[in-house]
Amino acid sequence: MYQFLQRQRNVDDGDAWNHFYDSYARLAYGFCLQRGCSHDTARDIFQCSVISVLKLLPSFELDVKKGQLQSVLLTIANLA
């Protein structure tokens, strides 16, 4: 996971961002739909979540005691 986060910090690493999208888009999208969002709103929330992750990455340190990256993403999606 640490290597994954290091690669995510490089916004030009297309492979890393494709992996991020493949890994977490369905999760966040489904999370929004379960909370009653429309498909368009769920997509918008995921996009906002990705932007938030981009802003957090430079200083983000994963602490598995506090949760996994997917927990962080779902928290962001829940706040959006």
Image (tube, rainbow, N blue to C red):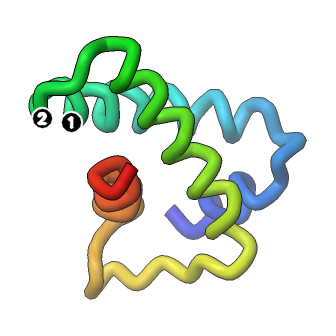
Q: Position of residue 73 (x, y in %)?
A: 39, 54
Q: Which residue is mark 1?
A: 31
Q: Is residue 53 above or below residue 34?
A: below
Residue drawn at (57%, 44%) of the image? 50
Q: What is the residue that sits farthest to the right in this orientation?
A: 12
Task: Identify the image quadrant of residue 42.
Answer: top left
Of the two numbered discs 1 and 2 in the rendering, the one whose residue sits closer to the viewer? 2
Q: Is residue 22 left or right of residue 37?
A: right
Asked if marks 1 and 2 touch (Cβ < 8 Å), the reply is yes
Q: Which residue is mark 2?
A: 35
Q: Is residue 18 left or right of residue 69?
A: right
Q: Is residue 31 left or right of residue 22?
A: left
* Residue 56 visible to an observer of this rendering: yes
Q: Position of residue 2 (x, y in %)?
A: 57, 69
Task: Identify the image quadrant of residue 16.
Answer: top right
Give the alpha-carbon distance from disc 1 to disc 2, as whole Å.
7 Å
Closer to the camera in the image, 18 or 56: 56
Q: What is the residue that sits farthest to the top in this orientation?
A: 39
Crowd rating for badge 1 (residues with CA inside 10 Å; few <14, some 14–19, many 20+): some
* Residue 23 visible to an observer of this rendering: no
Q: Is residue 26 left or right of residue 46?
A: left
Task: Give the residue type that dot 1 points to.
Answer: Phe
Q: Position of residue 43 (x, y in %)?
A: 43, 22
Task: Identify the image quadrant of residue 30.
Answer: top left
